[in-house]
Amino acid sequence: MTAALILQHGDWGPPGLLGEWAANRGLPFEIHRVDLGQPLPEPDGQPFIVSLGSKYSPRDTDVPVVSTELEFIQTAVARDVPVLGLCYGAQVLAHVLGATVEPAPEPELGWHTVRSSAPEIVPEGPWLQWHYERFSLPPGARELARSDRGVQAFSHGRHLGVQFHPESTVDIVAQWARLDAERLASQGIGDGQALLAGGEDYAEPARRAAFQLFDAFWARARRPERRHR
């Protein structure tokens, strides 16, 4: 089988549970470090492409790695290569599909549940979140989940975008809290680690929910038809 492609945007944003799931399912994958500025491969023939979290927004089109990835995902969508967007990756996917990406009125940080209209695809959580942006529902997409602050998950053809981080663990997000200390202080949050409280209770259910979500995406990705939502 041709390897899936995972786009990683920094040392701090590894595939985490996604890599564990792929190995468990016998799915080969390659990690491409977008932040290092290396040329992206052609989006052609991969079983799927995943875009992980990033410190950037799709609105940062003056940043070369952002504009390059936007073009890359646009090409993948045009060629019907299934795309799984996680947080920033979902914002990128939504943007190329015609949605609006904008600053969220309040960030969503730590553990959050979502209201799911398709729990067989997107369980309600709680999920780890760490984002300051939000997106509207792309034209022609099906909304799968939302929170009071916006769309949390959508499908479009064989593509799936989720605003939360099913791939991440508490240890991964705890590093983001440390890196974001100054930004958190500007939001009136003095202890980012406290936002992760309850992780020892949520971690295993979140892992099972992540595997369910990834399995649902993989089932969609293997379908030949293009018109389902």
Image: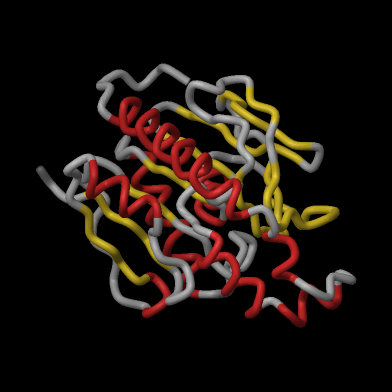
Asked if 159 appears above or below 121 in the picture, the reply is: below
Which residue appears at 65% of the width and 59% of the height? 130
Q: Is residue 17 left or right of residue 131?
A: left
Asked if 66 appears above or below 143 in the picture, the reply is: below
Q: In this view, does 222 lie to the left or right of 70?
A: left
- Quarter of the image containing the N terminus? top left
Q: Quadrant of residue 37?
A: bottom left
Furthest toward the left, the residue is: 1
In the rendered image, residue 177, in percent from the top left (x then y), is placed at 66, 72
Q: In which quarter of the image is residue 145?
A: top right
In the rendered image, residue 161, in percent from the top left (x then y), is placed at 51, 40
Asked if 141 appears above or below 15 in the picture, the reply is: above
Which residue appears at 22% of the width and 40% of the height? 25
Furthest toward the front, the residue is: 201
Furthest toward the right, the residue is: 188
Which residue appears at 63% of the width and 20% of the height? 117
Which residue appears at 67% of the width and 58% of the height? 131
Of residue 209 and residue 8, the one placed in the foreground of this image is 209
In the rendered image, residue 26, in percent from the top left (x then y), is placed at 17, 43
Of residue 139 and residue 124, the one placed in the foreground of this image is 124
Asked if 164 appears above or below 157 in the picture, the reply is: below
